[in-house]
Amino acid sequence: MDRFLDVVAVLSGALIVVVLGSLRREHIRVEYSVSWLAAGVTMLVLSQSDTLLGAVAAFVGVAEPALALLFTGFSVFLLVFYRFSMIISTLRDANIALTQRVAILEYQVESLHEERETSQPG
């Protein structure tokens, strides 16, 4: 089990490094990176703390701490994905509203252009 915990710790550290690197290069916004950093730190702390992992295993009701770690990791990433689904839904709705407003403005501009052409003597 120690090898498994070490692998999880390395992967968690890699996740943290990748997110921080993406944040530094501005490939990800700060408000979105917080969720990934929290997930990485949670997995890193749990994989390195036998006491905390044992407490989580007892709370969840499993005998094996590795299963508790997998369950916790799955739950944390599920929450992150749910949060991003909510953000994407909000952005999609805002995109639809913006598209509708642009269409209305284009119609008004075309109407004004046609009105100007018909009102000019010629």
Image: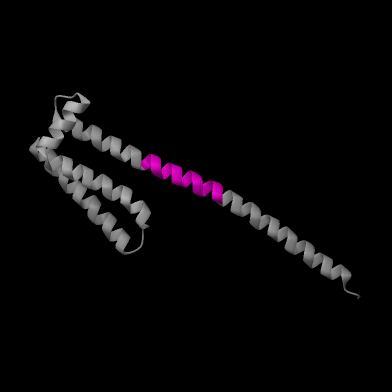
Query: Magenta residues?
Result: 81-94
Residue 8 in view in this figure: no
Magenta stretch, main secondary structure class: helix
Q: Is residue 38 magenta?
A: no
Q: In the rendered image, which quarter is residue 61 located in?
A: top left
Q: Position of residue 69 (x, y in %)?
A: 19, 35
Q: Residue at x 39, y 39 (%)?
A: 82
Question: Is 111 situated left or right of 35 in this image?
Answer: right
Q: Position of residue 106 (x, y in %)?
A: 70, 60
4, 108: nearer the viewer: 108
Residue 109 in view in this figure: yes
Q: In the rendered image, which quarter is residue 39 located in?
A: top left
Q: Position of residue 16 (x, y in %)?
A: 24, 52
Q: Is residue 87 magenta?
A: yes
Name the residue at the right extreme: 121
**13 relative to 116, above or below:** above
Q: Position of residue 51 (x, y in %)?
A: 10, 36
8, 65: nearer the viewer: 65
Name the residue at the left extreme: 2
11, 97: nearer the viewer: 97
**13 relative to 27, above or below:** above
